[in-house]
Image (cartoon, rainbow, N blue to C red):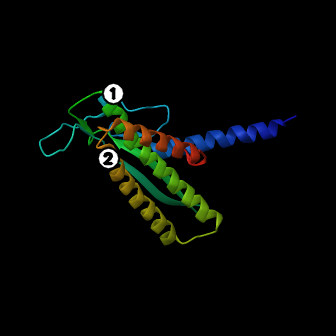
Amino acid sequence: MISMKYVFAIILCTVVCSEKLWAQSKSFDPDVYIMWNASNKLQWSDFEATNDDSRFGDAGTAVKIVAKPYYEKRRLYYNVFALFNKKKSWASDVNDRLLAHEQLHFDLAEVYARKIRKKVAELRRSKVKDLKIYNKAVKKILEESNQADELYDHQTLHGALPKNQITWEKKVARQLMELQDYSQ
């Protein structure tokens, strides 16, 4: 039988951890950013920027990965978020196929956010304390993220090749599942 102290400790930890994440996420303006969430898919109404003649394609998704280090009780931690910028994302055509393509850009950002969380956890387990080593590892993964994003658009022809789009959807879904332990 589980003791009440144990149950209380779990509840307290859950509340404290949830409040900490909530407080950290508040630093992102919800009028500008959407934080990645598996159950919250993008809608065309999230694409608030206007298209202009300088932009290529039917839609543009502005996503970024924020990785901010901080210290707590002399231990190094990172807050890592995949964010969608509503004010910089735009669409001139709206259809389900295109929205699925744009959603996958956001999902791909979350894959790399999880890779960063995983790398940070590995470095912490190895007792690495040098912030420069962490930052170098984070920078490398961010560069890989940019390359993967470009490859995705190239191989799917910005979503115009359905067979390749499905291949990428399966690949990203598999990666999200494999990195489940590093989700928020």
Q: Is residue 118 above or below residue 22?
A: below
In the image: residue 181, left or right of residue 163: right
From the top left corner, tell me how far across and down residue 80 is, in percent: 48, 52
Q: Secondary structure at mark 1?
A: helix
Q: Is residue 73 visible?
A: no
Which one is earlier in the sequence, the residue at label 2 or at label 1?
Answer: 1
Please tell me how crowded label 1 is: few (under 14), some (14-19), or many (20+) other residues with Cα within 10 Å.
few
Q: Residue at x 46, y 66 (%)?
A: 135
Q: Residue at x 62, y 43 (%)?
A: 16
Q: Secondary structure at mark 2?
A: helix
Please tell me how crowded label 2 is: few (under 14), some (14-19), or many (20+) other residues with Cα within 10 Å.
some
From the top left corner, tell me how far across and down residue 184 is, in percent: 54, 44
From the top left corner, tell me how far across and down residue 42 is, in percent: 38, 32
Q: Residue furthest right?
A: 1
Query: What amino acid is labelled 2 in the image?
Result: Asp
CA–CA distance between discs 2 and 1? 17 Å
Residue that numbered label 1 is attached to: 96
Q: Residue furthest front?
A: 163
Q: Residue at x 46, y 46 (%)?
A: 110
From the top left corner, tell me how far across and down residue 62 is, in percent: 31, 45
Q: Quadrant of residue 93?
A: top left
In the image: residue 20, left or right of residue 30: right
Pick the front one: 113 or 177: 177
Residue that numbered label 2 is attached to: 153
Figure quadrant of the N terminus: top right
Q: Residue furthest left?
A: 53
Query: What amino acid is labelled 1 in the image?
Result: Asp
In the image: residue 106, left or right of residue 47: right
Q: Residue at x 41, y 51 (%)?
A: 65
Q: Is residue 143 above or below residue 41?
A: below
Pick the front one: 51 or 2: 51
